[in-house]
Image (cartoon, rainbow, N blue to C red):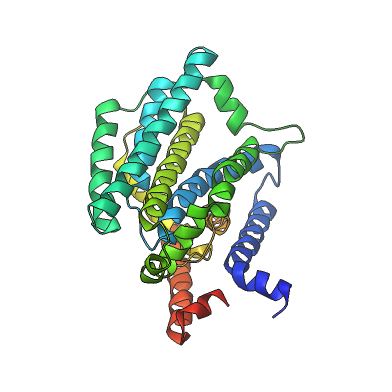
Amino acid sequence: MTTSGYFFSEHKGTIAAFVTAVAFFVLYVSNHQAGLTANVAATAANKGVLLALVAMAQTLPVLTAGLDLSVGMVFVLTNCLASALVFGTPFETALGVVAVLLVGSACGALNGVIVVYGRLQPIITTLATGAVYYGFALLLRPVPGGNVNSELAEAVTGQLPGGIPASLLFLLVVVLLVWVPFRRSVLGRAAYAVGSSETAAYMSGVPIGQARILAYTLSGLLASIAGLMLTFITYSGEASAANGGTYTLNSIAAVVIGGTSLFGGSGSAIGSIFGAFVLRTIGDLLFVFDLEPFWQPLAQGVILLAAVSLGAIRLLRMRNRLDVFT
Protein backbone atom coordinates (compact mmCIF):
# COMPACT_ATOMS: atom_id res chain seq x y z
CA MET A 1 0.00 0.00 0.00
CA THR A 2 1.31 3.49 -0.85
CA THR A 3 1.92 6.24 1.69
CA SER A 4 -1.21 8.06 0.58
CA GLY A 5 -3.14 4.80 0.85
CA TYR A 6 -2.03 4.30 4.44
CA PHE A 7 -2.91 7.90 5.26
CA PHE A 8 -6.41 7.53 3.81
CA SER A 9 -6.92 4.20 5.58
CA GLU A 10 -5.89 5.67 8.93
CA HIS A 11 -7.86 8.90 8.58
CA LYS A 12 -10.82 7.91 6.43
CA GLY A 13 -13.26 8.47 9.32
CA THR A 14 -11.96 11.99 9.83
CA ILE A 15 -12.02 12.70 6.09
CA ALA A 16 -15.59 11.43 5.76
CA ALA A 17 -16.72 13.58 8.72
CA PHE A 18 -14.96 16.64 7.25
CA VAL A 19 -16.57 16.19 3.83
CA THR A 20 -20.01 15.68 5.41
CA ALA A 21 -19.62 18.75 7.65
CA VAL A 22 -18.62 20.94 4.71
CA ALA A 23 -21.46 19.62 2.53
CA PHE A 24 -24.03 20.21 5.28
CA PHE A 25 -22.72 23.72 5.97
CA VAL A 26 -22.81 24.67 2.28
CA LEU A 27 -26.39 23.37 2.09
CA TYR A 28 -27.25 25.37 5.21
CA VAL A 29 -25.85 28.74 4.10
CA SER A 30 -27.20 28.33 0.56
CA ASN A 31 -30.71 27.99 1.99
CA HIS A 32 -30.36 30.54 4.79
CA GLN A 33 -32.31 33.73 4.04
CA ALA A 34 -29.29 35.89 4.99
CA GLY A 35 -26.75 33.72 3.18
CA LEU A 36 -23.17 33.45 4.39
CA THR A 37 -22.70 36.53 6.55
CA ALA A 38 -20.19 37.11 9.34
CA ASN A 39 -22.95 36.85 11.97
CA VAL A 40 -24.32 33.60 10.54
CA ALA A 41 -20.83 32.08 10.41
CA ALA A 42 -19.98 33.22 13.95
CA THR A 43 -23.21 31.83 15.41
CA ALA A 44 -22.77 28.48 13.67
CA ALA A 45 -19.09 28.33 14.69
CA ASN A 46 -19.81 29.09 18.35
CA LYS A 47 -22.39 26.31 18.59
CA GLY A 48 -20.18 23.88 16.72
CA VAL A 49 -17.06 24.65 18.78
CA LEU A 50 -19.00 24.18 22.01
CA LEU A 51 -19.96 20.61 21.09
CA ALA A 52 -16.56 19.98 19.49
CA LEU A 53 -14.80 20.65 22.80
CA VAL A 54 -17.06 18.22 24.66
CA ALA A 55 -16.58 15.66 21.85
CA MET A 56 -12.80 16.02 22.20
CA ALA A 57 -13.20 15.39 25.94
CA GLN A 58 -15.14 12.20 25.18
CA THR A 59 -12.61 11.01 22.60
CA LEU A 60 -9.73 10.50 25.02
CA PRO A 61 -11.43 7.94 27.31
CA VAL A 62 -12.94 6.21 24.26
CA LEU A 63 -9.44 5.69 22.82
CA THR A 64 -8.64 3.64 25.94
CA ALA A 65 -11.80 1.54 25.38
CA GLY A 66 -13.64 3.50 28.06
CA LEU A 67 -16.60 5.85 28.05
CA ASP A 68 -16.99 9.00 30.14
CA LEU A 69 -20.61 9.69 31.05
CA SER A 70 -19.55 12.58 33.30
CA VAL A 71 -18.23 14.94 30.60
CA GLY A 72 -21.59 16.69 30.35
CA MET A 73 -21.76 17.22 34.11
CA VAL A 74 -18.16 18.49 34.30
CA PHE A 75 -19.18 20.83 31.47
CA VAL A 76 -22.18 22.05 33.51
CA LEU A 77 -20.20 22.31 36.77
CA THR A 78 -17.42 24.40 35.21
CA ASN A 79 -19.99 26.60 33.49
CA CYS A 80 -21.52 27.37 36.89
CA LEU A 81 -18.08 27.88 38.44
CA ALA A 82 -16.94 30.18 35.63
CA SER A 83 -20.04 32.33 36.05
CA ALA A 84 -18.98 32.89 39.68
CA LEU A 85 -15.24 33.43 39.16
CA VAL A 86 -14.35 34.64 35.66
CA PHE A 87 -14.96 38.38 35.93
CA GLY A 88 -13.46 41.48 37.51
CA THR A 89 -9.98 42.80 36.82
CA PRO A 90 -7.76 41.03 34.28
CA PHE A 91 -5.82 39.40 37.13
CA GLU A 92 -9.00 38.20 38.87
CA THR A 93 -10.33 36.93 35.55
CA ALA A 94 -7.11 35.01 34.88
CA LEU A 95 -7.23 33.44 38.34
CA GLY A 96 -10.84 32.46 37.73
CA VAL A 97 -9.98 30.80 34.41
CA VAL A 98 -7.13 28.86 36.03
CA ALA A 99 -9.40 27.76 38.89
CA VAL A 100 -12.05 26.51 36.45
CA LEU A 101 -9.50 24.55 34.43
CA LEU A 102 -7.99 23.03 37.58
CA VAL A 103 -11.40 21.93 38.85
CA GLY A 104 -12.24 20.31 35.51
CA SER A 105 -8.87 18.54 35.41
CA ALA A 106 -9.33 17.35 39.00
CA CYS A 107 -12.75 15.91 38.14
CA GLY A 108 -11.23 14.02 35.21
CA ALA A 109 -8.27 12.84 37.29
CA LEU A 110 -10.65 11.53 39.96
CA ASN A 111 -12.48 9.52 37.29
CA GLY A 112 -9.19 8.05 36.09
CA VAL A 113 -7.94 7.19 39.58
CA ILE A 114 -11.18 5.39 40.44
CA VAL A 115 -11.16 3.47 37.14
CA VAL A 116 -7.50 2.45 37.48
CA TYR A 117 -7.10 1.82 41.20
CA GLY A 118 -10.71 1.03 42.06
CA ARG A 119 -10.84 -1.37 39.10
CA LEU A 120 -14.38 -0.27 38.29
CA GLN A 121 -16.00 -0.08 34.88
CA PRO A 122 -15.63 3.42 33.35
CA ILE A 123 -19.34 3.67 32.55
CA ILE A 124 -20.41 2.95 36.14
CA THR A 125 -17.66 5.14 37.60
CA THR A 126 -18.39 8.18 35.48
CA LEU A 127 -22.16 7.78 35.84
CA ALA A 128 -21.69 8.02 39.63
CA THR A 129 -19.15 10.83 39.60
CA GLY A 130 -21.27 12.75 37.09
CA ALA A 131 -24.12 12.79 39.60
CA VAL A 132 -21.73 14.15 42.24
CA TYR A 133 -20.46 16.87 39.90
CA TYR A 134 -24.03 17.85 39.07
CA GLY A 135 -24.76 18.13 42.80
CA PHE A 136 -21.90 20.61 43.19
CA ALA A 137 -23.21 22.54 40.18
CA LEU A 138 -26.62 22.83 41.84
CA LEU A 139 -24.93 23.98 45.03
CA LEU A 140 -23.16 26.74 43.10
CA ARG A 141 -26.11 27.77 40.95
CA PRO A 142 -29.48 26.73 42.41
CA VAL A 143 -30.95 29.23 39.93
CA PRO A 144 -29.39 30.48 36.66
CA GLY A 145 -27.27 33.60 36.94
CA GLY A 146 -23.77 34.94 37.33
CA ASN A 147 -21.44 37.05 35.25
CA VAL A 148 -18.34 36.85 33.06
CA ASN A 149 -15.65 39.19 31.80
CA SER A 150 -17.34 40.69 28.73
CA GLU A 151 -14.11 41.66 26.99
CA LEU A 152 -12.74 38.11 27.23
CA ALA A 153 -16.07 36.65 26.17
CA GLU A 154 -16.22 38.91 23.12
CA ALA A 155 -12.62 38.06 22.21
CA VAL A 156 -13.43 34.33 22.19
CA THR A 157 -16.91 34.36 20.65
CA GLY A 158 -16.73 37.43 18.40
CA GLN A 159 -15.18 37.94 14.99
CA LEU A 160 -11.62 38.39 13.80
CA PRO A 161 -10.66 40.79 10.99
CA GLY A 162 -12.31 39.61 7.79
CA GLY A 163 -15.34 38.24 9.64
CA ILE A 164 -13.62 34.99 10.65
CA PRO A 165 -15.22 33.52 13.82
CA ALA A 166 -12.83 33.89 16.75
CA SER A 167 -14.11 30.63 18.24
CA LEU A 168 -12.49 28.68 15.39
CA LEU A 169 -9.10 30.15 16.28
CA PHE A 170 -9.81 29.33 19.94
CA LEU A 171 -10.55 25.72 18.96
CA LEU A 172 -7.34 25.54 16.92
CA VAL A 173 -5.32 26.76 19.91
CA VAL A 174 -6.91 24.09 22.14
CA VAL A 175 -6.09 21.39 19.57
CA LEU A 176 -2.46 22.54 19.34
CA LEU A 177 -2.00 22.84 23.10
CA VAL A 178 -3.89 19.74 24.27
CA TRP A 179 -4.53 17.17 21.54
CA VAL A 180 -1.32 17.40 19.50
CA PRO A 181 1.05 17.05 22.50
CA PHE A 182 -1.07 14.17 23.85
CA ARG A 183 -1.12 12.37 20.50
CA ARG A 184 2.66 12.63 20.13
CA SER A 185 3.52 11.77 23.74
CA VAL A 186 4.55 8.37 25.06
CA LEU A 187 1.42 8.17 27.22
CA GLY A 188 -0.71 9.23 24.27
CA ARG A 189 0.58 6.33 22.21
CA ALA A 190 0.13 4.13 25.28
CA ALA A 191 -3.55 5.14 25.41
CA TYR A 192 -4.00 3.86 21.85
CA ALA A 193 -2.21 0.63 22.79
CA VAL A 194 -4.45 0.11 25.83
CA GLY A 195 -7.57 0.60 23.74
CA SER A 196 -6.32 -1.76 21.06
CA SER A 197 -5.44 -4.60 23.44
CA GLU A 198 -4.92 -4.09 27.16
CA THR A 199 -3.37 -7.54 27.54
CA ALA A 200 -0.83 -6.96 24.77
CA ALA A 201 -0.09 -3.49 26.15
CA TYR A 202 0.56 -4.95 29.61
CA MET A 203 2.81 -7.67 28.25
CA SER A 204 4.76 -5.00 26.34
CA GLY A 205 5.37 -2.96 29.48
CA VAL A 206 3.07 -0.10 28.50
CA PRO A 207 2.17 2.15 31.49
CA ILE A 208 -1.55 1.32 31.37
CA GLY A 209 -2.57 3.10 34.56
CA GLN A 210 -0.73 6.31 33.76
CA ALA A 211 -2.14 6.40 30.23
CA ARG A 212 -5.70 5.99 31.47
CA ILE A 213 -5.36 8.60 34.22
CA LEU A 214 -3.87 11.10 31.75
CA ALA A 215 -6.67 10.45 29.26
CA TYR A 216 -9.38 11.08 31.86
CA THR A 217 -7.56 14.11 33.29
CA LEU A 218 -7.30 15.75 29.87
CA SER A 219 -10.93 14.81 29.28
CA GLY A 220 -11.88 16.83 32.36
CA LEU A 221 -9.67 19.70 31.20
CA LEU A 222 -11.35 19.81 27.79
CA ALA A 223 -14.81 19.61 29.36
CA SER A 224 -13.90 22.58 31.58
CA ILE A 225 -12.75 24.54 28.52
CA ALA A 226 -16.17 23.81 27.02
CA GLY A 227 -17.76 25.04 30.27
CA LEU A 228 -15.80 28.28 29.93
CA MET A 229 -16.92 28.58 26.33
CA LEU A 230 -20.57 28.18 27.32
CA THR A 231 -20.15 30.93 29.91
CA PHE A 232 -18.60 33.21 27.29
CA ILE A 233 -21.58 32.59 25.00
CA THR A 234 -24.41 32.89 27.56
CA TYR A 235 -22.79 35.27 30.09
CA SER A 236 -24.28 33.14 32.87
CA GLY A 237 -24.20 29.73 34.52
CA GLU A 238 -26.97 27.16 34.86
CA ALA A 239 -27.01 23.79 36.60
CA SER A 240 -29.04 22.09 33.87
CA ALA A 241 -29.22 18.30 33.99
CA ALA A 242 -30.82 18.36 30.53
CA ASN A 243 -27.83 20.26 29.13
CA GLY A 244 -25.38 17.85 30.70
CA GLY A 245 -27.19 14.77 29.44
CA THR A 246 -27.67 16.15 25.95
CA TYR A 247 -24.03 17.12 25.53
CA THR A 248 -22.86 13.77 26.88
CA LEU A 249 -24.97 11.82 24.38
CA ASN A 250 -24.12 14.16 21.51
CA SER A 251 -20.42 13.89 22.34
CA ILE A 252 -20.62 10.11 21.96
CA ALA A 253 -22.44 10.54 18.66
CA ALA A 254 -19.82 13.03 17.43
CA VAL A 255 -17.01 10.64 18.38
CA VAL A 256 -18.59 7.80 16.39
CA ILE A 257 -19.41 9.99 13.38
CA GLY A 258 -15.80 11.22 13.45
CA GLY A 259 -14.51 7.70 12.93
CA THR A 260 -13.29 6.81 16.44
CA SER A 261 -14.02 3.21 17.39
CA LEU A 262 -16.00 2.72 20.59
CA PHE A 263 -13.92 -0.43 21.06
CA GLY A 264 -10.88 1.83 21.52
CA GLY A 265 -7.46 1.92 19.93
CA SER A 266 -8.22 3.93 16.81
CA GLY A 267 -9.56 7.34 15.95
CA SER A 268 -8.76 10.99 16.46
CA ALA A 269 -10.08 14.04 18.26
CA ILE A 270 -9.91 15.87 14.92
CA GLY A 271 -12.53 13.49 13.54
CA SER A 272 -14.68 14.10 16.62
CA ILE A 273 -14.50 17.84 15.97
CA PHE A 274 -15.87 17.40 12.46
CA GLY A 275 -18.44 14.93 13.80
CA ALA A 276 -19.61 17.62 16.22
CA PHE A 277 -19.98 20.12 13.37
CA VAL A 278 -22.02 17.54 11.44
CA LEU A 279 -24.44 17.17 14.36
CA ARG A 280 -24.72 20.90 14.91
CA THR A 281 -25.34 21.61 11.24
CA ILE A 282 -28.17 19.06 11.21
CA GLY A 283 -30.03 21.24 13.70
CA ASP A 284 -29.38 24.34 11.59
CA LEU A 285 -30.63 22.57 8.47
CA LEU A 286 -33.87 21.64 10.20
CA PHE A 287 -34.26 25.30 11.12
CA VAL A 288 -33.76 26.68 7.61
CA PHE A 289 -36.05 24.03 6.10
CA ASP A 290 -38.65 24.78 8.80
CA LEU A 291 -39.04 21.14 9.84
CA GLU A 292 -40.58 19.96 13.09
CA PRO A 293 -38.22 19.78 16.13
CA PHE A 294 -38.65 16.03 16.55
CA TRP A 295 -36.76 15.47 13.28
CA GLN A 296 -33.47 16.56 14.89
CA PRO A 297 -33.08 13.68 17.40
CA LEU A 298 -34.47 11.32 14.77
CA ALA A 299 -31.86 12.43 12.20
CA GLN A 300 -29.08 12.29 14.79
CA GLY A 301 -30.18 8.81 15.84
CA VAL A 302 -30.23 7.52 12.26
CA ILE A 303 -26.75 8.94 11.54
CA LEU A 304 -25.36 7.53 14.78
CA LEU A 305 -26.92 4.12 14.11
CA ALA A 306 -25.48 4.08 10.60
CA ALA A 307 -22.00 5.04 11.86
CA VAL A 308 -22.03 2.41 14.61
CA SER A 309 -23.36 -0.24 12.22
CA LEU A 310 -20.59 0.42 9.69
CA GLY A 311 -18.00 0.06 12.44
CA ALA A 312 -19.58 -3.15 13.70
CA ILE A 313 -19.68 -4.66 10.20
CA ARG A 314 -15.99 -3.93 9.77
CA LEU A 315 -15.16 -5.61 13.09
CA LEU A 316 -17.23 -8.68 12.18
CA ARG A 317 -15.32 -9.03 8.90
CA MET A 318 -11.90 -8.85 10.59
CA ARG A 319 -10.04 -12.12 10.95
CA ASN A 320 -7.29 -10.47 12.99
CA ARG A 321 -7.64 -7.46 15.28
CA LEU A 322 -4.50 -5.98 13.74
CA ASP A 323 -6.53 -5.53 10.55
CA VAL A 324 -8.07 -2.40 12.09
CA PHE A 325 -4.75 -0.62 11.51
CA THR A 326 -4.31 -1.73 7.90
* Residue occupying image coordinates x 41% and y 60%: 64
* Residue occupying image coordinates x 23% and y 40%: 132
Q: Is residue 292 above or below residue 10?
A: above
- Residue 213: x %, y % from top left: 37, 49
- Residue 10: x %, y % from top left: 60, 69
Q: Is residue 287 above or below residue 258?
A: above
| In-image side of 136 versus 230 (left or right) | left
* Residue occupying image coordinates x 28% and y 38%: 133
Residue 86 in view, yes or no:
no
Give whichever of 266, 308 is nearer the camera: 266
| In-image side of 268 versus 19 (left or right) | left
* Residue occupying image coordinates x 22% and y 48%: 128
Give whichever of 289, 167 is nearer the camera: 167
- Residue 49: x %, y % from top left: 55, 44
Give whichever of 205, 181 is nearer the camera: 205
| In-image side of 223 versus 273 (left or right) | left
| Residue 14 lies in quadrant | bottom right
Q: Is residue 311 above or below residue 260?
A: below
| In-image side of 60 versus 162 (left or right) | left
Q: Residue furthest right?
A: 162
Q: Quadrant of the C terminus?
A: bottom right
Residue 12 in view, yes or no:
yes
Tally of numbered tags = 0
Q: Quadrant of the N terminus?
A: bottom right
Q: Is residue 211 above or below residue 236?
A: below
- Residue 88: x %, y % from top left: 48, 13
